[in-house]
Image (cartoon, grey):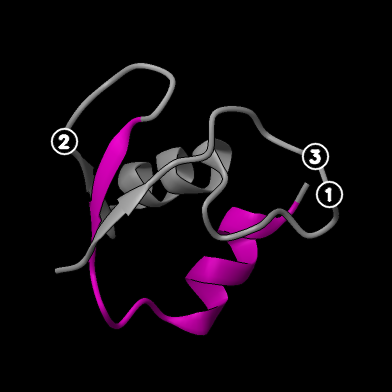
Amino acid sequence: MPKVSAKKKCCKDKPRCKACPVVLMRLSKMGYAEQLTTGKKAKFDVEKNIPKKAMVIARQR
């Protein structure tokens, strides 16, 4: 599983970017990512093959 660092702050674009902390938290709640560290630059362990539908839902506003 690749490790991804979250951005410091969400830019609130539509759709949200893949490194957005909100998207990574949503993916961790769905079970596709695991949070390794906390803080402004949190690190997540993300699965390689995330279904497209799950990624679309996570990136919605």
Look at 61% across and 61% down and name the residue there. Answer: 57
How far across and how far down the image is residue 29, in percent?
35, 42
Q: Amino acid at mark 3?
A: Lys
Displayed quadrant of residue 38: top left
Residue 59 counted in the magenta span: yes
How far across and how far down the image is residue 58, in percent?
57, 55
How far across and how far down the image is residue 21, in percent?
51, 37
Q: Nearer the viewer, residue 25 or 31?
A: 25
Residue 41 vs residue 45: left or right?
right
The residue carrying pointer 2 sits among few (fewer than 14), some (14 to 19) or many (20 or more) residues within 10 Å by Cα, namely few
Q: CA distance from mark 3 to mark 2?
A: 23 Å
Q: Which residue is mark 3?
A: 12
Query: Which label was assigned to residue 13?
Result: 1
Circle 1 — which element?
Answer: loop
Whether label 3 touches label 1, CB < 8 Å: yes
Give the position of the N terminus as an image quadrant: bottom left
Circle 3 — which element?
Answer: loop
Circle 2 — which element?
Answer: loop
In the displayed structure, 29 sits above or below 45; it is: above
Q: Amino acid at mark 2?
A: Leu
The residue carrying pointer 3 sits among few (fewer than 14), some (14 to 19) or many (20 or more) residues within 10 Å by Cα, namely few
Residue 61 vs residue 3: left or right?
right
User: Which of the two labelled residues, at mark 3 and mark 2, occupies the earlier sequence position?
Assistant: 3
In the displayed structure, 39 sits above or below 35; it is: above
Q: Which residue is mark 2?
A: 36
User: Which of the two labelled residues, at mark 2 and mark 1, occupies the earlier sequence position?
Assistant: 1
Look at 36% across and 76% down and name the residue there. Answer: 50
Q: Nearer the viewer, residue 19 or 26?
A: 19
- Identify the magenta region: 42-60
